[in-house]
Image (cartoon, rainbow, N blue to C red):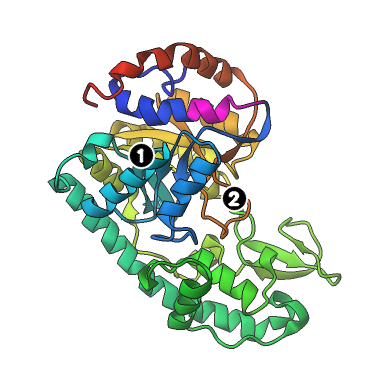
Amino acid sequence: KPTRMVVDNRVKWVAGLGLLCVVGMLLSSRSGTQTGTVDMHAHSAESDADTSAEDQISNAAALGLKGMWLTDHDMIRDMPRTRALLKHAKALGVHLGLGVEITVDFGGKEHHLLGYFPDRAWAATNLSPAMEKLQEACAAVKRSRETRNEGLVAHVNEQLAKHADIFVTGGETCKPLAVDEVAQWAIAHAGLAEPASLGRPHFRAYLIKVCHARDAMIFGPRDGDGRGKFSSSGDVSFDATAEGTPFEALLHSSTLERRGITFDPLPIADAVALIHAAGGRAVIAHPPTLGKGWPERLDKSLAKLAASGLWGLEAFSSEIDEESHSTLVQLAKKYSLHVTGGSDSHGRLKTYARLGTMRRADGSEYEDLAAWQETGPRQDHALHDGGL
């Protein structure tokens, strides 16, 4: 039975730069980390990457990508900026899609929801009323980042003062962080576009470069709970059975949540509805980062979310391991959802998430995709003719 990723004629605009994009990424070669033809999940310095949107598009062209989606956190660009980016991409021969990655509340845990919008969403002089409503909702989430950052800085300063011998190479004392100082440093050294976009990747870069913090102890595995062990020989492990001094990864989302240091995220059902009303498709980003027991947690929620308009699951990325691929594809089939793939590139701030790359494995889902690649491109003339 083919997955909905490849056979839904009602979403022709997504087939143009969505379904075919995933096909390009998944079929590039055999298992492992692969370079694709389109990236459906990338960020710029307008949120929390260190690379401008123009440079990300230029990088995509240099890599030979046919297209990419810019999915910056909690922001919908205004029309002049959007048109400027579309013009830049067209000049380079890159098909650019504009989307968003919204910080949401998923059953009490902070998570991310991707939104993808058709080309016609940007064809008018002004944003539609529904898109303006989504834009304001995203802006409210982004404003709450400032409160989160103050709490984050207080937490990091406390941990570095108490445990410099663990977190800092050589046990040196780091000057206490201040949000404004980190923002100015990030503007000068880490590609931050504006202080309001200061995020955890910028704090990580500052901690490494200025405080000489151990990189492995800043985030830790995203699919874990941030708890690790530091051995007497200087090894860092996030295996619960390891020996050593317990610690919590400084900026792991679970570490922050345990201390009440969070955004004011949108309830995921509200975010799905806002994306849907604005003519877009909502996709749950990197589901394994929901943490321990994520397949069961996801399974319990998908029926209701799918009924309210959820369109898909991000099943393939630079960090979703091969063991999780089949789980996500099976959940997508169970609830008649699509699956997508993208790198989650943040420029140089996430060294493991390189533009245009993702992990993949072999299985029956790829046979379905192969069949789509044989027939789908022949429908290219109709991709932008119909509605959703």
Main SS category, magenta section: helix
Residue nearest the observer in this picture, 40 or 64: 64
* 160 and 278: which is toward the camera: 278
Residue at image position (27%, 54%) is 81
User: Residue at the location (23% across, 42% down)?
Assistant: 122
Vertical relation: 170 (above or below) 196: below
24 is within the stretch colored magenta: yes
Residue 114 location, quadrant: top left
Left or right side of 173 for 27: left
* Position of 30 relative to 231 (above/below): above
Q: Is residue 91 magenta?
A: no
Q: Is residue 317 left or right of residue 244?
A: left
The correct choice, above or below, for 67 with respect to 44 in the image is above
Q: Pick whichever, 99 or 384, lies toward us.
A: 384
Q: Position of residue 380 (x, y in %)?
A: 35, 18
Between 205 and 355, which is closer to the camera in this rendering? 355
User: Mark 1 falls on what kind of element?
Assistant: helix
Which stretch did the figure color magenta? 22-29
What numbered label is drawn on residue 90? Answer: 1
Quadrant in the picture for the C terminus: top left
Residue located farthest toward the right when viewing the structure as drawn: 233
Q: To which residue does mark 2 refer?
A: 223
Confirm whether residue 301 shows in the render.
Answer: yes
Instruction: Indicate the amino acid at tag 1.
Output: Lys
- For the residue labelled by badge 2, is the local secondary structure a helix, a strand or a loop? loop
Q: Amino acid at mark 2?
A: Asp
Place of residue 367 in the rendered image (x, y in percent of width and height, measured from the top left): 57, 15
Q: Using a 10 Å C-alpha cutoff, classify the residue at mark 1 as few (fewer than 14 neighbours), some (14 to 19) or many (20 or more).
A: few
Where is residue 364? Give x, y as percent: 59, 17
In the rendered image, the vertical position of residue 133 relative to residue 257, given as above or below? above
